[in-house]
Amino acid sequence: MISIDILNQTKKIFSPAGILARKLADYESRPGQLAMAEGLASILQEDDRCDDITDMGRTLAVEAETGIGKTLAYLVPAVLSRQKIIVSTGTLNLQDQILNKEIPFIRKYIDPELSALCVKGRQNYLCLYRWKQFFSTSRPSLFNTGRELDEMRDWLRESRTGDRAELDWLEDNSPLWREVSATSSQCLGGNCPEGEACFLNRLRKKAVRSRLLIVNHHLFFSDLALRRFGFAEVLPRYESVIFDEAHHLENVATRYFGSSFSHYQVIDLVKDLDKMAADRIPSKKIDKTVQLARSLAFQADHFVKIFPGEMGRFPLAEMLEKTADWKKEIKDLKERIIALGRQLEVMAHADEIWNVFIRRCDELLVNLSATAEEGSSSYVYWFERRRKTVALTASPIEIATDLQESLYPQVKSVIFTSATLTTGSKFTYLFDRLGLDSRTETLTLPTPFDYKNRTLLYIPENRFPLPASPAFFRAVQERTAEILQLSKGRALLLFTSIRAMEQMRDFLEDQFPYPLLVQGSAPRAALLEKFQQDTHSVLLAVASFWEGVNVPGETLSCVIIDKLPFEVPSDPVIMARMNKIKEEGGNPFFDFQIPRAILSLRQGVGRLMRCATDQGLLAIMDVRLFAKQYGRLFLKSLPESPIVRDIDEVAKFFDMEGKYSASTPVRPNHPTHI
């Protein structure tokens, strides 16, 4: 049977004498990796048990902590299954790693016929039509240097993908790339004169022929939402899905299962219409189109001005209460969109190229209608004020039902994996949020790294101020400076707010002898590279740096976290989810806030040990871990590091560290056990 073949082949490949051990440099056979691979092989097998599941494909949740080697553990059985499989990741970096590192190895030693393809969102590919339009106007002269243009032109002569990842010199927020990338709203579809040469069209054809597709969560749920609402699909049909970094799924799916309307979308449409009109022979119809477009832009600008100036995310109900003529404002905006759409229909009778703008007007109208009124109790309606724009959004309060209807019944199997899926050793939170039931199989695979002997967890003494105290920030700053002197820099400092990070920077700047690297002062990749190269530097960061930072070795010998990462409960989506849990008789704090904070904390703590020879200090400057009853839930979810609460023990730890090689355990002497 196929199932026996997959399982047996998997066992052989991961055995101490298997292909991986013989062909992969520095490979060590790990029981956890084999257990995960066997679990995947069992789920992906095609046998009679699949007939018993009529309303939902087979599901498996695997928590594989750092050092398990989960990427190969899911890729090998996926390839052996010979199914059409989507691997969805949380980041583009992991996509590139899979395609450029793991896939070539698998193709060389396991399956020479494997067809695998990395598919990214449209904005990652160059649009040939927009590129040529860009050069046919005066816009190239807006750029100060011709070097980027020349290098991009040279690249296009050789590139077979149009993927911006090939341009390692291109800045993250390159204004040039925004001018020439392939955004969905600007795609001409079948009317595009570059359709045959289009990088995206060629990519789609390759995707149909490929057995393994590597995407990110944003693209996957964008495609799933299109399928759900009956629109054309981005990805070809697939049999099974593997979600890596699955702890991100609820947040990403929420974005795509909702609706959004923004002032920026209107201005972007008007700007593109202006460009299109400028490329056409002048006429009264063209002039009328431009006039109506600019009238819409004027109305959108007026719409932005009725919102409060404070930046942030707020419930829409606040605007509905404070704005007496809200309905009139929405009506006026809709009328301008409708008028422009009708004029574009007139234009499209003579030239089909205008159809793309009709579609964009229709989308604006639909999204405005869906977000401007509180129409469904299943959604939370909110607005976000940014520096120069305002966005209205309707987000689903729960995504579980959406997944149960649009994903699980449509595929043979769905696998969820991450280093952090459980809270308090249980999958309850994940199951509740993603709509999984008791048929979902689970695996919990602890890290093989020796946290007991190679790390220390420091939590300040009981008299240390609580986060709510006015003295907290100063106490954290002073104690952090003490620790950094003992560690001689070599630290990643993680904060729960930009304000706390900036205050720490200001505190350390004048008195600290080691280089300080601060998030926002340079691109993420440049900061991490500098941090890696300068052994005694200190990196201060928030948000995205809590995960995805992989810096093995002495450079990262200390991770300091300012406090437990509870989310701001005033966020409209968080507030709505907490209210729903309360309405259903649950406890929002224990059922929602604590599990989310635990998962974030585990991600942050996971930055310390990236390989078996790493060692160092974890410091969490929040005494609620001992002062509050719920602190035990956090401690239970952390690695088995010995706990100390005396700064002198930290001094002894770093003193001992200097007497041992990287391969020798530090062995703390006075741990506190929980």
Image (cartoon, rainbow, N blue to C red):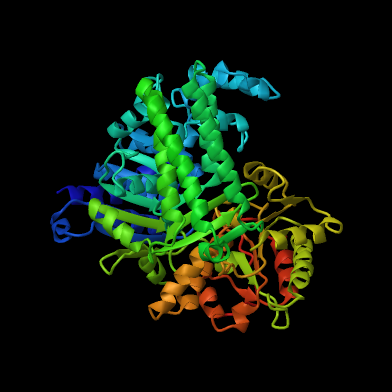
Residue most toward the right? Answer: 510
Residue nearest the viewer, comparing 357 with 492: 357
- Residue for point 20% across, 47% down: 5
Residue nearest the viewer, comparing 645 with 469: 469
Residue 659 visible in the picture: no
Quarter where residue 370 is shown: bottom left
Q: Is residue 443 above or below residue 18?
A: below
Residue nearest the viewer, comparing 266 with 226: 266
- Residue for point 24% across, 51% down: 410
Does residue 19 appear left or right of residue 578 in this picture? left
Q: Quadrant of the C terminus?
A: bottom right
Does residue 494 appear left or right of residue 536 in this picture? left
Residue nearest the viewer, comparing 627 with 503: 503
Quarter where residue 142 is shown: top right
Residue 335 visible in the picture: yes
- Residue for point 61% across, 37% down: 173
Residue 194 in the image: x percent, y percent? 41, 20
Residue 586 in the image: x percent, y percent? 41, 79
Q: Is residue 601 above or below residue 672?
A: above
Q: Is residue 332 above or below residue 352?
A: below
Residue 336 in the image: x percent, y percent? 48, 41
- Number of numbered markers: 0
Residue 112 in the image: x percent, y percent? 31, 32
